[in-house]
Image (cartoon, rainbow, N blue to C red):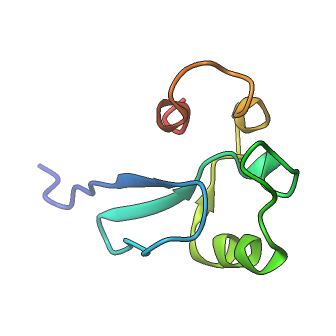
Amino acid sequence: MDNNKTIKILVGYHKPAVLIKNDIFEPIHLGRALATEASEDGKMSDMDYQWMLDNMIGDDTGDNISELNRYLHYEKEKKSIF
C-alpha cells in the first residue's frame, strides 16, 4: 500500500493577488496565453505578468484551451481543470 499520496488543489489567478502556495495549494495563471493582450479589463502590465510567470504555473501547457479563455462562455475557473 502506498502511503505517500499527494493532493494538489489548484488556486486560479487572473491577475496578481495574495499568493496562496504551499505543498497542497498550487496557484495557476488562468488565460496565460492571452495575458499580454488587451481585454475589456485593460492590459496586464509587464511587471504583473512577470510576477505571474515567476510565482505560478500557467494553464497554457500540454493539451490546453488557454487561448480560448476570453471566447468561451462558461466560468473561467472551470477551464483550468480541462
Name the foreground residue: 20 vs 17.
Answer: 17
Percent x, y of residue 43: 81, 59
User: Which residue is drawn at the image coordinates 75% and 29% (left, top)?
Assistant: 68
Name the foreground residue: 43 vs 51.
Answer: 43
Percent x, y of residue 4: 20, 61
- Which quarter of the image is occupied by the C terminus? top right
Left or right placement of residue 47 versus residue 21 in this view: right
Left or right placement of residue 26 versus residue 76 in this view: left
Compared to residue 67, the image places residue 30 above or below, namely: below
Compared to residue 12, the image places residue 4 above or below, namely: below
User: Which residue is drawn at the image coordinates 65% and 70% (left, top)?
Assistant: 52
Name the foreground residue: 2 vs 39.
Answer: 39
Give the farthest residue toward the right: 37
User: Which residue is drawn at the image coordinates 73% and 32% (left, top)?
Assistant: 70
Percent x, y of residue 27: 47, 62
User: Which residue is drawn at the image coordinates 48% and 35% (left, top)?
Assistant: 81
Q: Quadrant of residue 20?
A: bottom left
Left or right placement of residue 66 versus residue 82 in this view: right
Percent x, y of residue 26: 42, 62
Compared to residue 11, the image places residue 79 above or below, namely: above
Q: How many marks?
A: 0
Name the foreground residue: 24 vs 12.
Answer: 12
Compared to residue 26, the image places residue 2 above or below, namely: above
